[in-house]
Each structure stands twice: as C-alpha cells, then as structure tokens.
Image (cartoon, helix red, strand yellow):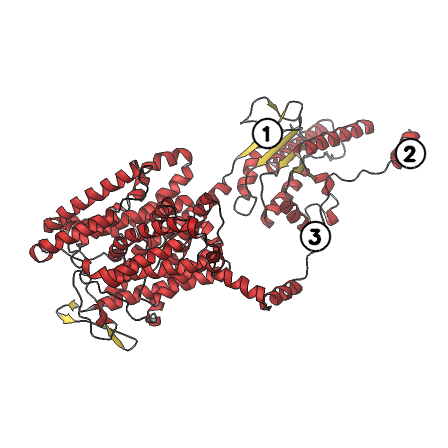
Amino acid sequence: MEEVTNVTETTPALPPLLERRVRQRQPTVSVLKSKLKQGVTCSVPRVRSTLTGFFPVVKWLPKYKLREYVWGDVMSGVIVGIILVPQAIAYCLLAGVEPIYGLYTSFYANIIYFLMGTSRHVSVGIFSLMSLMVGQVVDREVFLAGFDLNDDFKASALPDVFNGSIDTNLTAGKLHTVELMGQQCGKECYAISIAAAVTFLAGIYQVMMAVFRLGFVSVYLSAPMLDGFATGASFTILTVQAKYLLGLKIPRHQGYGTVVVTWINIFANIHKTNLCDLITSAICISILVAGKEIQERYKDRLKIPLPTELVVVAGATLASHFGELNSLYGSSVSGHIPTGFIPPQVPRFGLMSRVALDAIPLAVISFAFTVSLSEMFAKKNGYTVRPNQEMLAIGCCNIIPSFFHCFTTSAALAKTMVKDSTGCQTQVSSLISAMVVLLVLLFFAPFFYALQKCVLACIIIVSLRGALRKFKDVPAKWRASRNDAIVWLVAMSATALISVELGLLVGIVFSMMCIIYKTQNPKVSLLGRAKDSDLYEDMDEYKNLMPPPRVQVFRFQAPLYFANKDTFLKSLYKAVGVEPFLEMTKRRKAEKKAKEMSLKQAKANGDKNNGEVVIGLVKRELEFHTIVLDCAAIPFIDSTGMATLKGLVKEYKEIGACILLASCNTSVIDTLQKGQFFGKDDKDMSSLLFHTVHTAVLYANSTFAALERSEDSVV
C-alpha cells in the first residue's frame, strides 16, 4: 500500500483537456481614444476611401467594361423605363398627388441610387406599398385641413401653385386655401407639401439609422411577417382602387377599417357605376392579365418582357381622346400633366410635427425591402452589398428628392426582377431608365391628358397578382410551419382590416410574442445512452437508448431566464418524478409519524424518560442519486436563471441528490462564475461542471460508488 501511495504522489498531474484563454480587455478610455484618433485622422487614402464609400460609383464606373456590359444595361434600362412611366403615373392615385410627381420621384430616385447604391440590380423608385402609406397620410392631413377629398375636382394650372397663386377648392361653395410659409396653398399644393415633408423625415430617419449602425432593426421584420404585411397592404390597395374601376365618386375613408368601410360604400353606391369606366376596366384587365400570363408561360422564349402596360396606356389614351369619353360619358381622366421641372422648394418644416410618427414605418419598411432585395440579388449573382450603405443610399433617395416635390421611394421587386432577367450588369441601367422618364417629362407628358383613371387603377391592380396569389400558399405554409403561417395570417389580417401602420406594429409584436412563447414552452426531454458509446439523446425520439443507472439526464432546449424559470422547474420536476419541497414534506410527515409511534411504544413499555426519543429525518431511497443537466441547448442564462440553478442544487442536496452541469457554452459558464455558482474562487467547479454528458455520468457513478464503500466500511 505504501508503494502504491508513493507512486501516486510522484506521478505528475495531467493538464486539463480544455483550458480557457485569459482575456485581457483594454481599458475603455484607451479604446475610445484610439477610435476618436482614427476618426479625426485626415489623409489622402482616408479621403479616397470615404469618397468611394459614400459614392460607390466612383469606384466601379472607371472599371466599367463597355463592350461586355453596355448592351445588357441599355436594354434593361429602356425596358424598365417603359414599364416605369405608366406605373409612375398610376401610383400617384395611391399617393394622393398629381401624376407629374410620380415621374419626378422615379427620375431623381434612379439617379441618386446610381451614385450611391451598392447593388447592381435593384431598381429604386415608386413602390405600391410606399405610395399607399404616403397616400393615407396625405389624405388624412388634407381632410383635417378642411379640403374636399373628391379627387375629381381639378385645380387651376399646376405651376401657379408654386408661384404662390391661390389654388381653388370647392368646400361648401367657398374658396378654401391654407397658408404655408407665407403663401396661400390649395389642395394640390398642400398634398404634395405633406408628401414631401413625410418623405424628408423618412430619409432623415434612414440616414440616422445608417450613421448609428441601426440596421439590425430590420431583423425584427421576419420574412413571414413582411410577407403577410405586403399581402394585407395589397388587399388594401385593391380596395382603394376598386372605385376607379367602377367610376364611383367615393372619398377615401379616413381612420381604421378602410377595407370594410370602402367596400360598404362601394356596394351602397353600386347603382352609380359609370358604364364607360366599367367596360374600359374590363378590357384593360383582360389585356394586362393575358399579357402577364403569356409572359410567365413563355418567359424562356421571350428575351424581353412584353410592354403590356405601355400598350394599354397608349391604346386607352387614344381611345379616350378621340372618343371624348370624358365629356360624353363623364369618365374621370388624369388631366393636364405639364412638361419640364418645377423649381425646387424646401420641405415645409411646419408640417413635420404632424407627420413625424408616420415617417417611422415608412423609413423602416423602405429600408427593409431595399436591403432584402439587394442581398437577395447579390447572392444570386455572386457579389456583395453593404447594408449600411444601402440604408444611406435609400435615405438620400428620400431626402434630396423631397426638395423637388417627390414622395417616398423604395426598391421594387417586380422591376428589379425585370432588370435581372433582361441582362442588367450595373446601375448604368438605372441611369438609362431615368433618361426614359426624362424624355416623358420634357416632351410626352401632355399626351397623357385623356388617360382614364380606371386604366391606371387596372395597372395597379394587375401588378398585385403576385402578392394576392400568396393566399394559395397558406396551406403549404401551415404544413411547413404553423408558427410562420399564424404570423402571416395575423399580419395580413391586421393590415387589411385595421390599417397599414397598425398592421405593421401588430405583425412585429405578434411575431416577437411567438418567439417569447417558444422560449417559455420549449421542448424538454430525458436522455438515454446509445449502446457502448458516449452519445446521449432523447429517449422519446430515438430507439434503443438506455437511461444511465441511478442518473437522470435532463435537457432543456431554450435560454434559461426570468420568463421561463417556472417552466424549467416544473418540467424538471415532472421529468425526474421528484419535487424537493414535496419530498421534504413527505419525509417530515414520516418523521412525525415515527416519533408518535415511538412515544406510544415508550409509554406502553413504561419508559421513565417521558417518551423523549431522538429520531433523525426519515430517509427515503430515491430512484436516482444525480441529475445531469445537459446545457448544450441553453444559449444564455440571466441572473434569475442562475439563482434558479443555485436553488435547485440546494434543494436536491437536502434530499440526497446532486445536480451536475454538462456541455455549457462559455457565456453560460461566465455568467455562473460571476454569480459564484461554483463557490468562492470556483472551488467546486471541477465537481459541478463537465464538458460532456458522459463524463458527468461517469463522475456521478464513481462518486456515489465511493460514498457507498465509505459508508459500508464505517458500518
């Protein structure tokens, strides 16, 4: 025995298998000083880097491969420009402003994104969802300002609005104007002033998000939530445009429940349907849908998309002009669209306090769609984009155009897909599209005077086919993930039935609540060992697993924090079959009963010590002596979770069972160390924490066996 002892003492201790690195953090003051010094340092390379960072075009345009890229860029630019013109005019119906402003918005947004964007394929400009959200703000403020929402009433010459002349509006038979910055402003002037103000603020928010690196905000917009939100908004757009298909004179509803109230008003006024508009709408929708179906069916054979919208607009404009549909049948037309540009004007800062909150969802949604589309097409075509620069670019696409009477812009999926499918290589295609819009602004805009509004509504509604088809995917969504399907349905329903802004808020809150619910009700399981291996898995999910003798291995698949600590405890008690408090209560009752029996026997035997006996707490044999907590699926714990583990160790120790932790990640270990879970100076760490479940089980069995041997030797 002495020889064995000597050998053991002289054998050097083996180093631990895993040893944590010692982290040495630099003082916060020195880190701030170095960053400040780096930030204020000015040099030629830094200026060049900053310039190319803000304006990526400076970097890639000199490397432009003319022969290789020019044909695809010109082709895609011209095609997108042709598609863009009728859509720019049409989406102004949604935005509640005159058609000329849609052309301005498309022109400026394409040029600015050409200079500042990092995506080669994204098409930035007017987007139906953004137009709808702007239109709701515009109509609300126009209504509150006392203007008549009958949008068929035409103002006097548009340029006079910005020269300070009085724009007329029929309100109770009187002229009505609003004073803005010392000028009298009519309905159309006030509408674009509201749109420019909310656009300016949305751009400011986006630039601030870029400066403070707040791009992470978009991660709270889950894909199912965004998908449901877009579908609900599409249904709202369809509802808002339905009156134009029928030629009904119904003001846009203000407040919640736009979809329900609008359809009630439509059916209440269905007898006033303009047959000319109805017939025109039926013909245009048939042609547009047929063109889309042909495009989808033969997209492999067709090298370029069919310009169906342009054909419909041109044909309908000619028919309306020569058929005199406006004067003979009372069909609503677009009216005068002037050529040229209106002088720039500073956004009305007095209006911004009224729309400051409305600009927040506009900024977030615009950024989210732009970045997601940029990353999607960058991944598809094998290059990278910078999300922060994308946020800055889209912010400038809103701030700068707001001085030129434009409204909020975003990346648009349909036009981006057209650019990608027609051979687009760089953002030169956006410059070409801007030139196409410029031609319309300078020369062809007046030719759209007789274009019926029902034709524009048809273009908008047919463009929603893709979003409205999402309803067919609901069963597949439900089968794939019930949680995602429910989030989609809630976001869609809230957006369509309440309002677009509240629908976005409800969708975000509900999707986050679903995540919280998952962490509060996670999957828990008891683990068993695969035969002759150190692999432990869920016994309910895998066959041929055996639980280790006298050891319970418990897995909790969620973070352990204040919101789910009770769930953790209840699931553990249920899994192992022993709750410490109840076990102690049972033992105390057994002790009391044993004491009473002992006293009775003492009295019966005539014990002269008045029946005073000493009885220790009655011990009941448990089915296990150790609980191993598999922490591999616990990403983090907070102070409440750590206190829960401390209490658990103490409670089970009182009933003769010990708790061991296995497979903890370093963040969990750090939290436990900071809370002195392993005792002072981590003295109990080696006996409580193990790298794998198997080592914890082996330690538990060996310790218990040694304890039994020592008890036997004492006896």
At x 38% / y 36%, what residue is drawn? Answer: 477
| Quadrant in the rendering for residue 693 | top right
Local secondary structure at mark 3: loop
**Which one is earlier in the sequence, the residue at label 1 or at label 2?**
2
| Rendered image: mark on residue 359 | none
Q: In this view, does 139 lie above or below 505?
A: below
**Which one is earlier in the sequence, the residue at label 1 or at label 3?**
3
User: Is residue 260 among what the camera can see?
Assistant: no
Disc 3 to disc 2, C-alpha distance:
38 Å
Crowd class of label 3 (few under 14; some 14 to 19; many from 20; radius 10 Å): few
Crowd class of label 2 (few under 14; some 14 to 19; many from 20; radius 10 Å): few
Left or right of 707: which side holds 441?
left
**Which one is earlier in the sequence, the residue at label 3 or at label 2?**
2
Where is residue 11? Give x, y as percent.
87, 35
How many marks can you see? 3
Amino acid under disc 3: Arg
Where is residue 66? Give x, y as percent.
43, 52
Q: Name the residue under label 1.
A: 537
At x 76% / y 31%, what residue is drawn? Answer: 707
Amino acid under disc 2: Asn
Instruction: Work out which quarter of the rendered image holds the N terminus and state it.
Output: top right
Disc 1 to disc 2, C-alpha distance:
42 Å
Where is residue 594? Give x, y as percent.
67, 30
| Rendered image: mark on residue 6 | 2
User: Is residue 454 among what the camera can see?
Assistant: yes
Crowd class of label 1 (few under 14; some 14 to 19; many from 20; radius 10 Å): some
Instruction: Work out which quarter of the rendered image holds the C terminus and state it.
Output: top right
Q: Name the residue under label 3.
A: 23
